[in-house]
């Protein structure tokens, strides 16, 4: 006990503190997608972060490598920051398969931390616009 008190006093005298703990930045949950369109894709999710949720997307296949933090994992993917509980990916190619992951960006002690990526979601855009006609 004497040894413990000696170290405790030493820490106090030197005037620094040690913060013990960790930040919990939870992973968002992808819920559902909106209507399939030729050039866009919409989705809903829960568990977003007040500091932004990142949607990283790119063409489907071996070239899609999810990244970490604010950065895409490969030149085949793009990063988009969203808030709220919906997102929309625009300027997509018709009839094409894409993949995406999501991760939260959290603020802890003045620094950003990031959640793990969600599982990869694969989707394809529509081949043509819907139309109606009168006979």
Image (cartoon, rainbow, N blue to C red):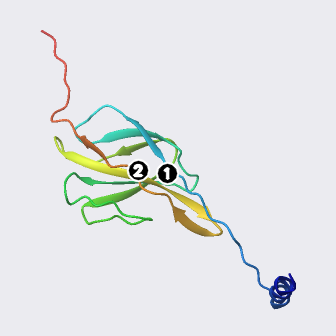
Callout 2 touching callout 1 (CB < 8 Å) = yes
- On the rendered image, what quadrant is the N terminus found in? bottom right
Task: Report the residue at 16% width, 33% height from top.
Answer: 128
Which residue appears at 56% of the width and 59% of the height?
Answer: 106
The x and y percentages for residue 77 are: 29, 59
Q: Position of residue 92 (x, y in %)?
A: 24, 47
Height in image: 133 above or below 19?
A: above
Which residue is at the front of the view, 3 or 98? 3
Looking at the rendered structure, the secondary structure element under dot 1 is loop
Q: Position of residue 86 (x, y in %)?
A: 45, 41
Whether 38 is drawn above or below 80: the answer is above
Residue located farthest toward the top when viewing the structure as drawn: 135
Determine the secondary structure under disc 2. loop
Evaluate whether residue 5 shows in this view. yes
In the shown orientation, is residue 71 left or right of residue 11?
left
Q: Quadrant of the C terminus?
A: top left
Classed neighbour count for the residue bearing mark 1: other residues with Cα under 10 Å, few (<14), some (14–19), many (≥20)? many
Query: Which circle's residue, 2 or 1, is located before the other in the chain?
Result: 1
Question: On the image, which quarter does residue 103 sit in?
Answer: bottom left
Q: Quadrant of residue 35?
A: top left
- With 4 as the anchor, is 45 left or right in this view? left
Residue at 19 percent of width and 19 percent of height = 132
Residue under numbered circle 2: 118
Residue 52 got which mark?
A: none
Could you tell me residue 133's position as x and y percent? 16, 16
Residue displayed at 28% across by 61% down: 65
The answer for how far apart the CA atoms under marks 2 and 1 are is 7 Å
* Residue under numbered circle 1: 27
């Amino acid at each position: 006990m004497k040894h413990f008190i000696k170290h405790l006093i030493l820490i106090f005298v030197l005037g620094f503190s040690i913060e013990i703990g960790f930040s919990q930045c939870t992973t968002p949950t992808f819920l559902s997608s909106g209507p399939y369109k030729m050039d866009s894709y919409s989705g809903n999710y829960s568990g977003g972060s007040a500091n932004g949720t990142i949607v990283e997307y790119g063409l489907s296949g071996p070239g899609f490598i999810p990244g970490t933090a604010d950065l895409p994992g490969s030149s085949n993917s793009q990063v988009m920051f969203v808030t709220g509980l919906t997102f929309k990916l625009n300027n997509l190619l018709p009839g094409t398969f894409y993949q995406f992951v999501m991760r939260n960006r959290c603020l802890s002690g003045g620094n950003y931390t990031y959640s793990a990526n969600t599982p990869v979601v694969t989707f394809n855009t529509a081949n043509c616009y819907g139309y109606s006609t009168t006979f």
